[in-house]
Image (tube, grey):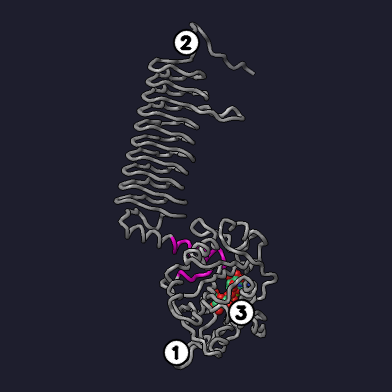
Amino acid sequence: MKALNIVILAAGKGTRMYSDKPKVLHSLAGKPLIQHVLDCALSLRPQQICTVYGHGGEAVPQAMQQYDAKFVIQEPQLGTGHAVQQAMPLLQDDSRTLILYGDVPLIQHSTLHQMQKAGEGLVLLSVNLENPAGYGRIVRDSEGDVQRIVEQKDATPEELQIQEVNTGIMLVPTAQLREWLGKLSNDNAQGEYYLTDIVEMAVGQGVTVHSVQPAQAWEVDGINNKMQLANLERVWQKEVAARLLTQGVTLIDPARIDVRGNLMCGRDAEIDVGCIFEGQVSLGDRVKVGAYSIIRNASIAQDTQIAPYSHIDSSEVGANCHIGPYARLRPGSKLHDHAHVGNFVEIKNSEIGQGSKANHLSYIGDSTVGCRVNIGAGTITCNYDGANKFRTIIEDDAFIGSDTQLVAPVTVGKGATIGAGSTITKDTPAGELTLSRSRQLTIAGWQRPVKGKK
Ligand code: UD1
Ligand code: MG
C-alpha cells in the first residue's frame, strides 16, 4: 500500500461558537476537538500529518506542540479546496492523502481503515441523512456510480432531494490531487474553491470513485455551535458507558458518568452516579466509587471503597482502602493497602503506610507515614514556612492525638504517642508519650465580664 499523508482542515472561523477561542480548541470529553482528530490520525501511522489552521492565529499550533505534526496557515480562507492547496508543498506525490476535518472529532480508526481498503482511486466517506440540508450531495448516475458532488447552494431542486451527503472526509492519490486542485475555480454560488469539485475531475479522467459509509453516524458529526458540541459530548459519554457496561462494570446510571480520558475497570467494579474520570484511571476488581467522586490520573487497587464526594488526583491507592466521604488526595499521594482516609482529610505528596488511618479533618502534606499509624482528628502537618516545604516522618505504630500540629521537618519515632492538642516542633522519641500543652487550670471565683448599660 502507498504511504499515507494526512491533511486536517482546521482554518474555519467557527463564528457560531461565539468564542474567542478557535473552534477546534474547544473540548469534547476533556480533550480539544483537534486532538481527537490528531490522535485518530496518528493511529493510522501516516508518513506525515499536516494541519491547516487560520482563525485564531498561532493558538492552534501552540496547543498541539506535543504532536509530531506540521502546521500550515491558510490566510485568507477561500474554501476547502484552497485550504488543501496550502498543504500541498509538504505532501509527497507517491502517496495517498487523507483529508480530515478538525471539527469532526469522533471519526474512528476502523472507518478510516475501511476507506484505505476500499481500493485505489478516490475514496469518499458518505452518509445517508433523513435531513440532508446544508451538506454537499453525492450525485450518482443510473448505474449507481458517483459522478460528482454538488453543494447545497449550487444544487437544483432535484439534486436537493438526494439524501446521500458528503461528510468531507476523503482519500485521494496525492499526485492527482495536486493536479486537480490546480484546476479548481471559484465560479460557484459561494465564490469559494470547493475541494468537492475534484470528484467530477476524477470521473472525467476515468479514475474510480469509491464510497464508504461510517460504522456509526456520530463519527461524522461536525461541530459548529455549543449545542452540537454538548450533544456530541452526550453521544460520546453514552458510547463510553455502553462499552463499560458491556465489559461488566456496574454503572448505577449510565447517563450519569463522565469519562474524560481512559477508564480501565476490573471485574465487578461499581460506579455510582455523577462521577467524573479524567486522564488515565484504573479501578481494580470490586472497587466501588461513591457518588459525585472525581478521579484523575490515578490507580485504585482491588476492593478499595471510595465513599461519595471524594477527589483523587495523580495518586496511587492500594487494596482494601477506605476513602471518604469528602476526602481529597492531591498529587503524589500513595496509600498502601488497608489505609483509611476519612472525611475532610487532605493528603498531598505523602505516603500512608499499610493499615494507617487518618479518619477526620486532617492535612497531611509532604509526609511519610509508616504502618498502623493512627492520626487523630484535626491533626495537621505544618509543612510550609512561607518559603520552603519540609517533610514530616511518622514511624510505624505511632499514635498522634487529636488536634496535633507537627511542625516540619520533624520525625515521630516508632510507636511514639503524641498527646492531644500538642504542637510538636522537635523529633519525638520512639515508644514514649510526648506532649506540649500547658497544664489545665481552674481559676476559682472568676467572673465573666458583663456588658455595661448604655
Ligand atoms: C463542506 C463540503 C460539503 C460537505 C460538508 C460536510 C466543500 C466545498 N463542501 O461544506 O460537501 O457536505 O463540508 O460538513 O468542501 N475550512 C478551512 N478553510 C476554508 C474553508 C473551510 O480550513 O477556507 C475547514 C473548516 O474549518 C472545516 C472544514 O474545512 O473544518 C469544512 O468547512 P465548512 O465551511 O464547514 O464546509 P461546508 O461549506 O460546510
Ligand atoms: Mg460551511
Q: Nearer the viewer, residue 134 or 332?
A: 332
- Asked which secondary structure carries label 2, the reply is loop
- Asked which secondary structure carries label 1, the reply is loop
Q: Are marks 2 and 3 in contact (CB under 8 Å)?
A: no
Measure the alpha-carbon separation of dots 3 and 1. 27 Å
Q: Which residue is mark 3?
A: 178
Splitting the image into four quadrants, where does ligand 1 fall?
Answer: bottom right
Measure the alpha-carbon separation of dots 2 and 1. 96 Å
Q: Nearer the viewer, mark 2 or mark 1?
A: 1
Q: Which residue is mark 2?
A: 439
Sort mark 2 into few (<14), some (14-19) or many (20+) by Cα contacts within 10 Å.
few
Q: Which residue is mark 1?
A: 144
Residue 312, given in percent of the width and then of the height, sits at 45, 43
The furthest residue to the bottom: 142
Q: Is residue 294 visible?
A: no
Vertical side of 340 occupied by 175: above or below = below
- For the record, the magenta segment spans 218-236
Measure the alpha-carbon separation of dots 2 and 3. 89 Å
The amino acid beneath tag 2 is Arg
Q: Residue at x 37, y 46 (%)?
A: 289
Vertical side of 61 occupied by 96: above or below = below
Q: Are marks 2 and 1 in contact (CB under 8 Å)?
A: no
Vertical side of 370 occupied by 300: above or below = below
Q: Nearer the viewer, mark 2 or mark 3?
A: 3
